[in-house]
Amino acid sequence: MINLCRVLSWLALAGTLVPSVLFFYGRVTLDQTKLWMLIATILWFATAPVWMEREHRES
Amino acid sequence: MSNEYEREPVPPEAQLGFGSFIGQYAGEHTAGTELMIGPLFVAAGVSAVDLLGGLLVGNLLAVLSWTFLTAPIATRARLTLYYQLERICGRRLVTLYNLANGLMFCLLAGSMITVSATALGVWFGFAMPQLNDVYPTGLGWMVAVIAMGAMVTVVAAYGYEFVARVANIGVPWMLLVFVAFGLIGLQQLGVTSFAEFWAKASSVIWTGGDPLPGQIKFTFWHITFFAWFCNMAMHIGMADLSVLRFARKSWYGISTASGMFLGHYLAWITASILYVVQLKADPGNTAVLPGPLAYNACGIAGVICVIVAGWTTANPTIYRAGLAFQAIMPRVSRYRVTMVTGAITTIVGAFPAVAMQLLDFVALYGMLLMPMGAVVFVDFWLSDRFGFQPNYAEQSGSQFNWAAGLTWLVTLAGCVLLVLRGGVQLYFVSLPGWFLAAILYVTLSRLLQRPVAARLSPGVQPL
């Protein structure tokens, strides 16, 4: 579960940045960029606390 | 980490590695106010060379100040600034310092609440402040600020730990949203490859020229000094003794580069790009409103970024202000002090003047606390050489070290005089001010100190 959340978190970070890179190169529209960034944001805040909290407790 | 070992040196087992400071500084300096500062540079008519070069030099100087001024004292004394000042200045003078510090924290947190409230304006469409507005712009604005201020205050009073954790979780994501702001803004300004960045940067984005009405013209030196001194209270002012006392090695001060070059370089530049996009779309729309700026670039994710950036940095700021005030009134509970502090902060947040004049306010904040940093520096390194007693208040049992108190007041008076009568701008005055404070403290200590028998606080080694 922890590892799955960690992988999803990394995907979420990629999903936060990659749409803007694609927009920069004219591959996607601004609306698509905003939508993917929102999805990535939700995914990050849903998954990152799971493993970051655990790491925090262990440290 | 700053609440432990408040009156004793940090022991070796509690000291932290380099990585702990990288994350902390990156998070602390990627705040909601970065979204104000970048656009205000554009409003000040800055050119591309001045902005990119000035930020590079200024942020480097800030990192060096932390590394060579703050960290060496922090890792030798390993005491909080407040306790170190108490030993030098005496309890009554530290009370005055706490009052000034707490008030400055209130103003800073107020501007962060202003920033967060602009995000609510995206959804609720109330009238928002313009660049030169001083007073609240209407009922909708007041309600938004009060709602945001109440939320921040209650959480700071009840659950600071929770917000600190949310802030840590938000940092990596927030940094990438700031990068996205820049990429999206660049594309909207017609930059479609990195090869053409420089040509467009100087001809389209940061073109220089006259500042917007009500703003002063910023040059390379303004940007350099602003970037260097915007955290002056933390490095030259020594507030970060409380943070870096946990560092195992003095060179960990260089970890502040994460905050300077991600927060104060990248974030300021990308935020300024968003403002240029707005001005190109509508030259008459000069309002610096982080909420709408972020929404136009990144949609709801951008608005969430503004709220998270503003909220997570306003919270510890209110908390720190509460601690500073509580030190003055130790019998009143921290909860009550934080609630009152939050109320003051919310009132400040309703007045957009502080946020809209953030460049001036930040320079003033550094100037106000800088003399005490000079006192700590001189007392630690130069007292033996110049033949006066270090930690004089502790050694003499004094409640008010007049040499330090007069140094603070006379330096501030000198700085104000230089600004008002000498034609020196606020952004530059703290540099001569530091040397003035250092000379004053040496001179006044030699004049005013009386011989003392050695006294030492329990658990503290002589320095």
Image (cartoon, rainbow, N blue to C red):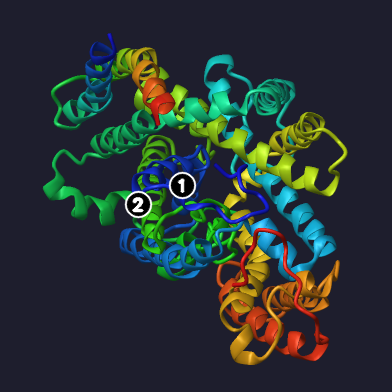
Label 1's element? helix
Label 2's element? helix
Q: Which residue is found at the position 61% from the left and 86% from the top?
A: B384
Provide the residue designation for mark 1. Answer: B13
Q: For this rendering, which residue is in front, B226 or B238?
A: B238
Q: Quadrant of residue B350?
A: top right
Residue B118's mark? Answer: none
Q: Which residue is found at the position 31% from the left and 33% from the top?
A: B176
Q: What kind of residue is marked 1?
A: Glu
Residue B261's mark? Answer: 2
| Residue B190 drawn above or below residue B387 | above
Q: Position of residue B388 (x, y in %)?
A: 70, 87
Question: Which mark sits nearer the N-terminus, 1 or 2?
Answer: 1
Q: Can residue B208 be seen here?
A: no
Q: Which residue is found at the position 28% from the left and 32% from the top?
A: B184
| Residue B415 drawn above or below residue A54 | below
Q: What kind of residue is marked 2?
A: Phe
Q: For this rendering, which residue is in front, B328 or B394?
A: B394
Is A35 on the left or on the right of B450, as rendered? Answer: left
Crowding around mark 2 (Cα neighbors within 10 Å: few <14, some 14 to 19, many 20+) is many
Q: Position of residue B386 (x, y in %)?
A: 63, 91
| Residue B168 drawn above or below residue B300 | below
- Mark 2 — on which chain does it sit? B
Q: Position of residue B32 (x, y in %)?
A: 51, 37
Q: In the rendered image, which quarter contains the N terminus of chain B?
A: top right
